[in-house]
């Protein structure tokens, strides 16, 4: 297929399937937020990456739903400009998948998935107690790309605190075998990091 989108536009659903099936594997941000009443929300996002090191900035992108309504994550960040970004891992993948369900606003995905909360330094939002890596973050910017169904918003957050299990970090390297991060493909498919190869970068 060759398509010039200005002349032959593809539907949002087709573009979603094409892009999510081609731009992969994608790391998973498991994002905790809370509203101004203190109700917690937890949701996974696979449009996610590091955007800057100094300052340390993470970027993730929630999409509007099929009715062009925003996710609770975006609504909560408008009320409380803080979040905790956890790294999606194989050991918690069932709970992660559970929190992708659409719940009425104000209902707690931590409770739905049976996840214990604990405090996160630097922010009011709780983190997942069992998560091996978590970043406490404050909102930097939200860039909105439209108001149609499946339009995205690029959320930029600055890391103000880090939690990482001592067994995973030796001061220089993260133990990926112990962390077991997972990536997102298309549909219901995920990927492990058990098959890796290395190539030396040119000088």
Image: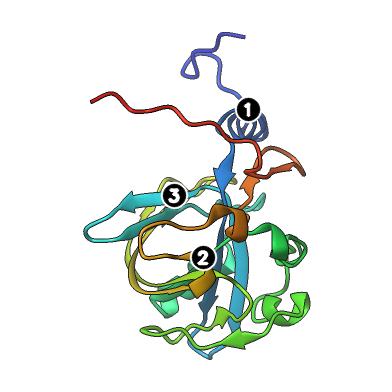
Label 2, secondary structure: give it: helix
Residue at the image point whose x is 52% and y is 47% from the top: 47
First in sequence: mark 2 or mark 3?
3
Q: Calculate the distance from the C-alpha at mark 2 to the C-alpha at mark 1.
A: 35 Å
On residue 168, which mark appears? 2
Q: How many other residues sit within 10 Å of disc 2, few (<14), some (14-19) or many (≥20)? A: some
> 113 and 156: which one is in front?
113
50 sits left or right of 182 in the view: left
Residue at the image point whose x is 48% and y is 83% from the top: 125
The x, y position of residue 141, in whole percent, is 31, 61
Q: Calculate the distance from the C-alpha at mark 2 to the C-alpha at mark 3.
A: 20 Å
The x, y position of residue 160, in whole percent, is 32, 74
Q: How many other residues sit within 10 Å of disc 3, few (<14), some (14-19) or many (≥20)? A: some
Q: Calculate the distance from the C-alpha at mark 3 to the C-alpha at mark 1.
A: 20 Å
The x, y position of residue 27, in whole percent, is 55, 48
Which quadrant is the N terminus positioned in?
A: top right
Label 1, secondary structure: give it: helix
Residue at the image point whose x is 50% and y is 19% from the top: 5
Please identify, in this view, whether the residue under mark 2 or under mark 3 is nearer the observer.
2
Please identify, in this view, whether the residue under mark 2 or under mark 1 is nearer the observer.
2
Residue labelled with disc 1 = 18
Whether residue 146 is visible? yes
Residue labelled with disc 3 = 49
Above or below 100: residue 113? below
Above or below 169: residue 83? below
């Amino acid at each position: 297929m060759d398509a010039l989108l200005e002349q032959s536009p593809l539907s949002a659903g087709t573009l979603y399937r094409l892009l999510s099936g081609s731009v992969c594997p994608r790391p998973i941000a498991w994002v905790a937020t809370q509203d101004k009443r203190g109700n917690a929300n937890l949701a996974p996002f696979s449009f996610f990456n590091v955007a800057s090191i100094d300052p340390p900035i993470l970027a993730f992108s929630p999409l509007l739903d099929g009715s062009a309504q925003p996710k609770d994550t975006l609504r909560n960040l408008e009320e409380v400009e803080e979040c905790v970004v956890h790294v999606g891992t194989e050991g918690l993948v069932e709970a992660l998948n559970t929190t992708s369900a659409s719940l009425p606003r104000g209902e707690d995905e931590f409770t739905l998935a049976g996840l214990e909360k604990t405090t996160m330094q630097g922010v009011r939002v709780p983190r997942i107690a069992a998560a091996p890596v978590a970043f406490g973050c404050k909102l930097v910017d939200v860039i909105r790309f439209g108001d149609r169904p499946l339009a995205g918003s690029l959320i930029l957050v600055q890391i103000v605190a880090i939690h990482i299990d001592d067994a995973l970090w030796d001061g220089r390297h993260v133990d990926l075998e112990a962390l077991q991060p997972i990536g997102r493909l298309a549909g219901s498919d995920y990927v492990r990091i058990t098959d890796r190869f290395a190539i030396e970068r040119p000088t």
